[in-house]
Amino acid sequence: MSPLLEVNNLTTSFPGAFGEIPVVDDVSFSIDPGEVLALVGESGCGKSMTALSILRLIPKPGQIKNGEILMVGRDIRGLSIPEIRGLRGHEISMIFQEPMTSLNPVVTVGKQVVEAIQLHERVDRAAARARTVELFERVGIPDASDRFDVYPHQLSGGLKQRVMIAMALSTRPKLLIADEPTTALDVTIQAQILGLLRDLQAETGMSILLITHDLGVVNELADRVAVMYAGRIVESGDRRELLLAPKHPYTEGLLKSNPALSQPGQPLPEIAGVVPPPSEWPVGCRFANRCTRVFDVCERDVPGRSQITPTQYACCHAVAKEQRGG
């Protein structure tokens, strides 16, 4: 099976005081048709910038410096402005973070979805309205016809997120990029949104790139997982093998700091320190200054890929040393 999306050696950078600073650094992954890939990591690791790079929506003065972004074999980097606009929404749609700020506050929610449909398809307003109401019903918005004419501030956070999902699905995309789709929602609404995404993915067969820091969300939706730290993918594998047997110290730390896995009455384990800004990334392994398994080579050399199983790898000197029997 050929990948639907293939990202090869992607580097995206911004100008800094002493030259270009990469925020996404030599990142590679692929997504097959009908597959859900979770891109996991703390805030500031480059996950959202990877998604914006795929859609060529990087804020200026940032730019893609290197790599390929292939959508069904076609390099997105080589598309003209009209071509990339046609691809956005039609072949690839995105649910952005914070539905509270992603919707236009002075336009009714129904009209916003109608505009998205008419931007990509030659349908009249009545047909676009009918499809919007159908989409609202499909994503579980009650009284869908009445809600067509309300403004975003009149909806709860969960309903705003459902409107965003309806808008993303309005042009029947092959790939949906969901950037922290349950952020700022309470636990009950989170579960409803995750269930909705799972059902819609099974129903439509679309692929999903799920961007999250929540491993509970990963366990609910993902087929495969790529763990990102400081602009690089440090571990990748099938969801089950990666969550049950993580190899990279960063992945292990993320799992141990999950409240769902903590022991009652015991302090929650944490990863010491914070993700450094791109201008302060270390020379060798970027996790070295937070790692409990660090040794000399980690601070000097960038770790290569250690293949653990046919589908799981980690970029870690400690893992490589263990595989050598050291």
Image: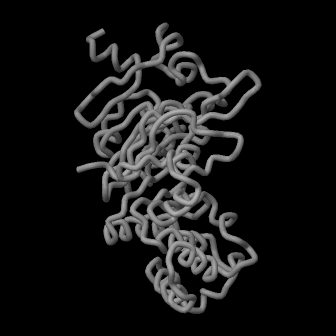
Q: Position of residue 117 (x, y in %)?
A: 53, 77
- Residue at image x 60%, y 92%? 146
Q: Nearer the viewer, residue 66 or 94?
A: 66
Instruction: List x then y, in percent, for residue 102.
Output: 66, 64
At 29% across and 26% down in the image, what residue appears?
Answer: 307
Indicate whether 260 appears above or below 300: below
- Residue drawn 27% across and 49% down? 2
In the figure, 297 relative to 293: above or below? above
Left or right: 43 in relation to 254: right
- Quarter assignment of residue 316: top left
Q: Residue at x 47, y 35 (%)?
A: 67
Between 62 and 149, which is closer to the camera in this rendering? 62
Expressed as whole percent of the image width and height from the top left, the position of residue 281 reads: 61, 23
Residue 222 seen in the current view: yes
In the rendered view, tell whether residue 60 sits above or below residue 277. Answer: below
Q: Quadrant of the C terminus?
A: top left
| Depth check, front residue: 88 or 304 | 88
In which image quadrant can residue 145 be found? bottom right
Numbered marks: total? 0
Provide residue 260's location: percent of width, then percent of height.
45, 49
Q: Is residue 182 visible?
A: no
Colouring style: one colour
